[in-house]
Amino acid sequence: MNPLIVRLDAYLREHRPAVYATLQPGLSDAELDAWQATLGDLPLPATFKDFYRWRNGQPRNDDAKQSLVFHYYWLDCAEATDEWQGMKQMAQQNADEPYWWNERWLPFCFCMDDVLCLDGAGSFDGPVGQVIEVTQDGETILQNSSFDKWLECIVAGFETLKVPTDTNDINQNTGFYFFGEQDYKSLVSRLDPDYPRVIEINW
C-alpha cells in the first residue's frame, strides 16, 4: 500500500475513529478497471487508484464532523461518476462560460456546491492530474500540482498541525475545519511550491 495511505489510515484509526468507521470497503482491480472504462480517456493516476483501492469513499453526509478533510466528504466511485456526468451537462448548458467547468475535471470530494476535482485537462497552464477546488462562491483554486502532493499535504497537515480534538471547536464558517488556514497554506507552499493558487477569471 502507498506509504501516504498507510499513514492516513493510522491517523484516522487512532484520532478520528468515528470518521474511520464511515469509510467504505475499497474497490477491486476489476472495479477500478470498470470505472476507468466508464471515464474513457480521463486518466486516473496510480496513487488515486490506490486511494480507492484502500477505501471507496464515504456515504453521502453533509455533517462537517463526519467529513474526511476540511468540510468535504469523500465521494465513492459511483457518486464521483454521477457528479462528473452531471457537471458536464451543466457546463454544456453554460457554454458561454467556458472556465466555469471542464468536462475533464473529476470530482472526488464534495460538500453542498463545493468540490475537489482531479484535473485531467491540465487547466490554467497547470499539469494534468493537479487538484482543483471549485467553490459555490465561484472561486477556482489550484490546490496542488498532483493528487500525490494533495495527499502528502493532507497527511502532513494531520500529523503536524493543530487539529481540534473536540468537535465543538470545529469552525463551521471558514472551511478549514482541521487546520488553521494560514498554517495549512504555508505547509502546502513548502511541500508543493507555487500552490495553492487562486485563479482570477475575468468574465
Image (cartoon, helix red, strand yellow):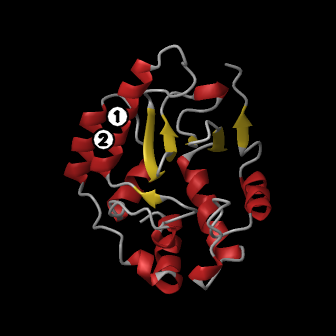
Location of residue 155 in the rendering, given as x and y in whole percent from the top left corner: 59, 67
Marks 1/2 in contact by CB < 8 Å: the verdict is yes
- How crowded pointer 2 is (Cα within 10 Å; few <14, some 14-19, many 20+) is rated as some
For the N terminus, which image quadrant? bottom left
Q: Residue at x 64, y 70 (%)?
A: 178
For the C terminus, which image quadrant? top right
Residue nearest the observer in this picture, 157 or 163: 163
Q: Residue at x 61, y 85 (%)?
A: 165
Residue nearest the observer in this picture, 58 or 51: 58
Q: Kindly tell me whether residue 160 is visible in this rendering.
A: yes
Location of residue 87 in the rendering, given as x and y in whole percent from the top left corner: 40, 33
* Quarter of the rendering containing residue 197: top right
Residue position for label 1:
86
Using the image, tell me which numbered label, if any, was put on residue 146: none
Q: Residue furthest top?
A: 96
* Quarter of the rendering containing residue 124: top right
Q: Is residue 101 above or below residue 196?
A: above
Q: Is residue 22 above or below residue 48?
A: below
Location of residue 188 in the rendering, given as x and y in whole percent from the top left corner: 72, 55
